[in-house]
Image (tube, grey):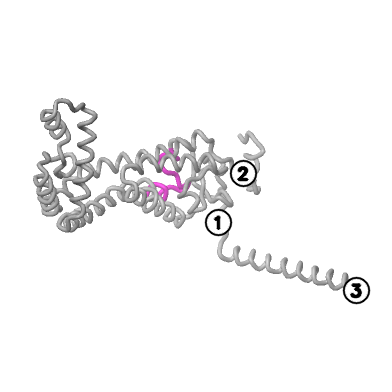
Amino acid sequence: MPNSDEDLARLYNAKAKAKKIGLGRRIAAFFIDFGLLIGVYCLIFFLAATPIIKNVSATAIGDINATYALHCEGHGYPYYTNEANFGFYEMDDGKYVADLRSNDPSLTEEEAYDKYFDAYNGLVSEVKADAAYVTAYSEFQKWYLFFDMFSYLVPAMAFELAVPLLNKDRKTVSGFLLGASRVNMGDDRPVKGYKILIRFGVIFLVELFGFKVLLNYWSLLVIPLASLIMILAIPSRITLSGLCSASCLVETRLVNRAPYPSKEERSFEKERQRKINEKRLKELEKERHQGGH
């Protein structure tokens, strides 16, 4: 039973704007979809992609470690294998600080760590300037970025492309849970497939992978924060992907179900508008002519 003027307007296809989704549900929708993407990304990357990267980049990792070890040994710095980071060698801070304090008991732990950070930063700069390291790291980075992109692509295609394309109301997982549909900003009809593709492209190439390349894992903080600011600041409560695809979320029960006009109807409307404009121009010209006399 319709319970508002807005419901009645929708019932009789009147030109009324659908009620935008509530702020709380809009924020929840973003975090549900984003959480699913990142959760599946982590599963794919850490359980599947990481072992593959280690395998295909074994030679490059070995060359990187050989260069790192050479510079460490040149300074007498201790190092260890960090299995959590693809097996790369890293300077051993605990042993370095312990050795410093053993050789100079007057050093406090804070002073010893200050010396460690100075030594570490100098070592990193030295290693990164080594041509052998640069060549090997470029080879490793190529495979890392490929599998990192793949790990983002799979959940993005599943949740932000396949799911909304396969249901008429263009709902994502959060839409099914919260009763929200993606519609055109202009007429509240469910968006067409090309807008879902545009939105998917922005989410994958910009919001997920682009920010990851620029900010590394800081992107996991920046993306939600930036999206939250947009949702709060823009009246239609859209994020970057919604802005680029000219779409927003509304309550599913209030979606405009009127069919899209056919090609013939669009042509007829265009011609009708052209005639109206011509008539108005003639009237204006006549008024201007009469005013001149």
Q: Residue 134 placed where, x, y %?
A: 19, 56
**Numbered range of the magenta stretch:** 162-176
Mark found first going from the N terminus, 2 or 1: 2
Residue bearing mark 3: 293
Which is in the foreground here, disc 2 or disc 3?
3
Which quadrant holds the C terminus?
bottom right
* Residue behind mark 1: 260
Q: Secondary structure at mark 2?
A: helix
Which residue is denoted by mark 2 in the rendering? 10
User: Reading the chain from its start, which is encountered first: label 3 or label 1?
Assistant: 1
**Towards the viewer: 84 or 117:** 117
**169 is within the stretch colored magenta:** yes
Q: Residue furthest right?
A: 293
Three-letter amino acid code at the position of disc 2: Arg
Image depth: mark 3 or mark 1 in front: 3
- Foreground residue, 187 or 141? 141
Residue 35, above or below 212: above
Residue 191 x %, y %: 50, 52
Residue plotted at (22% across, 42% down): 46
Q: What separation in Å lies between label 2 and label 3 (alpha carbons)?
A: 51 Å
In this rendering, the count of numbered labels is 3
Contact between marks 3 and 1 (CB within 8 A): the answer is: no
Tell me where residue 101 appears, x and y as whole percent: 14, 29
Q: Amino acid at mark 3?
A: His
